[in-house]
Amino acid sequence: MIKINIEKVNKYFLFLGICIFSLLIFNNIVLAAEKQPILRVGIFLDQTETSISGDGTFKIYNLKSNVLISEERNRVVKLLPRDKGIEILEKGVFSGPIEIIPVGNTKIIVMFNGQKYRYRGNIEVAIDKEHKKLNVINIIDIEEYLYGVLKNEISPGWPSGALKAQAVAARTFAIFNINKHIDQGYNLCATTHCQAYGGVNHEDPLTNKAVDETRGVIMVYKGKPIDAVYHSDSGGYTEDSENVWGSFLPYLRSVKSKFEEKVSPPHHIWSYSISEKDLTEKLQKQGHKINSIVSIESVKKSETGRASELVFTADNNKVINMKTNDFRSLIGVDLIRSTFFNIEAIGKESNITEDTEGKKEIEDKEEQKESIKEILEQKKDWTIKELLELMKKNKEEREEEKEEKVLKAEIVKSDTPLTFIFSGSGNGHGVGMSQWGAYGMTLQGSRYQDILKYYYQGIDIIKKY
């Protein structure tokens, strides 16, 4: 008979369980590290030439053949688009994309308009053969990408809670929009069309710390990353997504936001004026066949009071309908800072003339009128009915005189050029998180999680990697 030592068996299985558990934890850590997205960010696009260097040693590869072209240090390498590919001066023409890989802690330097921009990660230079232009792409992991985003989007001197809220919003936005420019060969651009990204030049220790302390944290709605759009200042209320972009998103709902008032944003209240002449020229450049604009009217407003559609009436009675966000783009989003505005017209066109025919008609009526005193002198005996009729006529004449005076006031000629004044509040499209609102909430003791859940409705905050 075989005797089994139960105690030894239990110890064996306990040891085996610990090993398996440890292995699972290790595998999960490895898998989690692998899940951190690697982004291709279009930093300089449609370039006729590109110059690249480094603050240390870097290697240049032909990606198509995966062959090392050269290893450089403290040298500027110039690249040019050619019919057969990309020329590297003194090295030749190469058909495939070129990748520049740093050695050690080297940061790659891209020269643009006389400025030097340093980047973490690798740099790829690809050619658009159709247009014979070069696209410079930064290949970088998402956390290091966020280092170069946050300082461009928010002040490093703001409270930690606001910085962390911005870090999570920017990370979530990048993951949701990871294929925004995939057809052009990269994931995201480096402008505000995606998120403003400036590489190492635009990093700061405080914003980097906010990225590190929220590493891998994103917002999800029903388990999926959200389109975490944000803006500078709500002006008092954020906006529903469909009123700006036409698509309903359940987590981008309008909320009251008075927190900005506690921190006095620089453009919380703003105004902008444009002459009729300048406005007409801008509309003409868009292809509208008009000579002048007579009036502007906001014909659609959301429940928050934001203008969603404008109507322009021209001198030939032509009507132009335009979405307010398109109008902001036409004039400049740094001039018409939000859609939260009122419109006032000052002055009149100098070619408006007086209504002489209307005046003559008034004068003729004056001649036909007979005063009450003259009528009473014509007859001494009056019946009650006649007196009542006379009083009625007198009242009607007074009303006519009142209307004529109004008409005369309206036809006064003015030589003041017509100018449209836009008076508004807030800064940006108004959807999602208000950055200045987040600042105000931190002063009330709100955590970054509280801020995010206030501006993005019904979301969960998870650690993705």
Image: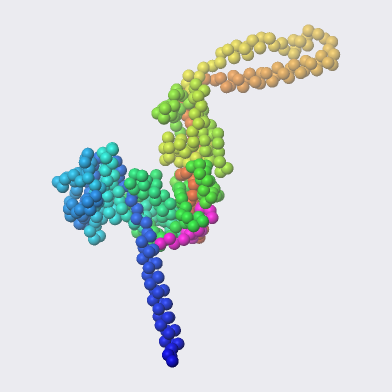
Single out the residue that lies furthest toward the bottom: 1
Could you tell me which residue is drawn at 25 percent across and 47 percent down? 97
On whether residue 460 falls in the magenta region, the answer is yes
Residue 387: x and y in percent read: 81, 15
Q: Residue at x 52, y 35 (%)?
A: 309
Is 105 left or right of 148, judged from the image as shown?
Answer: left
Instruction: Please identify the quadrant where the C terminus is shown.
Output: bottom left
What segment is highlighted magenta in the picture? Answer: 447-465
Q: Give yes or no for residue 279 being in the magenta stretch.
A: no
Q: Residue at x 48, y 31 (%)?
A: 420
Residue toward you, 238 or 410: 238
Q: Quadrant of the N terminus?
A: bottom left
- Given residues 246 and 334, the one toward you in this image is 246
User: What residue lies at 16% left-to-right and 45% top-to-bottom?
Assistant: 92
Q: Residue furthest top?
A: 378
Residue 278: give x, y in percent of width and height. Answer: 42, 29
* The quarter of the displayed image where residue 211 is located: bottom left
* Left or right of residue 385, residue 51 in this image: left
Kindly tell me whether residue 392 is visible in this rendering. Answer: yes
